[in-house]
Image: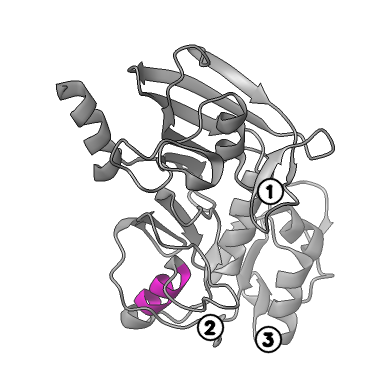
Amino acid sequence: MEFSWIYQSESPMMVKHFLKEQGVSRGLLAKVKFQGGTILVNQSEQNALFELKKKDQITLVIPSEGEHETVLQDTTAIEIVYEDEHVLIVNKPSGVASIPAQYHPNGTMANRVKAYYCQQGYVDRVIHVVTRLDRDTSGLMLFAKHGYAHALLDQQLRQKKLIKKYQALVTGGKENLAQHACIKLPIGRDLTSLIKRKVDQGGKMAETEYWTERQTADWSLVDIQLHTGRTHQIRVHFEAIGCPLLGDTLYGGALNLGIKRQALHCGSLRFMHPFTKQCLDFYLEIPADMRQVMQQKASS
């Protein structure tokens, strides 16, 4: 894969410093050096210490990644929302984990994407998960299709320029929910459980912003944006204010409204394409199981 730039500065600069400004990490530069890549300046091969001058053309040839041989293939079809040579966005169904674990090496979105890459005959088949979702959370999930794209998208995540928004159905809430508010409570491990988290003054600060869109006597529909990325953050924060997610057995959500998984959906994703610099904005409607709860209550 090749990427090219024209050096525009009047001041000389070494290639390695210029590439760092383009988001090329030292690890990626080492891969170019030792695994078959090339740095070209005006079509001539140069090393990373070469000094650039104005109007030089720099071309970075990145070697193919191959694949993680330990990631198994799951040929279950994926629902593609968007794809180009750099990124892949899929609609993850609830009940499917994002990545394999030691005792669950197959059946995840990563396994399904690996199979898709192989079916398509892609040269780069390493799975780069940019935004993962809990097993029972549905919605938009972003993959980078090579390591350079992954690094640039991770940079947007760190700078909070990649925006994910969620929709959730929470238990009750007329007395507990504002029309718009931020929940700012620290989260730590619950030592009574291997997976559960809790509000803990000794934990890491977490911030969840929400907007209340609709309410009934039994549930509220909220739009959510995370400003930090703690494990189970949405679930813990809404439990803490007395409004656990419907169907969330781990955090006390109501189970009598027809949904048996946490009613959480990543329905909005916005980021700048790492190479075209175009702002990409995606939206997925609320899935059928959450809609069914809302329709039943609306008709009753």
Q: Nearer the viewer, residue 119 or 197?
A: 197
Tell whether position 112 is magenta. Answer: yes
**Cα distance, mark 3 to mark 2?**
14 Å
N-term-proximal mark, 3 vs 1:
1
Q: Nearer the viewer, residue 40 or 89?
A: 89
Q: Quadrant of the C terminus?
A: top left
Highlighted range, magenta:
110-117
- Secondary structure, magenta segment, majority class: helix
Q: Nearer the viewer, residue 246 or 184?
A: 246
Name the amino acid, label 2.
Glu
**Cα distance, mark 3 to mark 1?**
29 Å
N-term-proximal mark, 3 vs 2:
3
Contact, mark 1 vs mark 2 (Cβ under 8 Å): no
Contact, mark 3 vs mark 2 (Cβ under 8 Å): no
Mark 1 closeness class: few <14, some 14–19, many ≥20 residues within 10 Å = few
41 over 258 or under it: above or below: below
Checking the image for residue 67, the label placed there is: 2
**Location of residue 192 in the rendering, given as x and y in whole percent from the top left corner:** 71, 52
**Location of residue 99 in the rendering, given as x and y in whole percent from the top left corner:** 53, 67
N-term-proximal mark, 1 vs 2:
1
User: Quick check: can you spot residue 117?
Assistant: yes
**Location of residue 121 in the rendering, given as x and y in whole percent from the top left corner:** 36, 83
Q: Residue at x 46, y 37 (%)?
A: 253
Checking the image for residue 35, the label placed there is: 3
Front position among marks 1 and 2: 2
Report the side of 141 relative to 79 (left or right). right
- Which element carries disc 3, helix, strand or loop? loop
**Location of residue 278 in the rendering, given as x and y in whole percent from the top left corner:** 46, 42
Name which quarter of the figure residue 280 lies in. top left
Name the amino acid, label 3.
Gln
- Which element carries disc 2, helix, strand or loop? loop
Instruction: Identify residue for label 1.
Output: 8
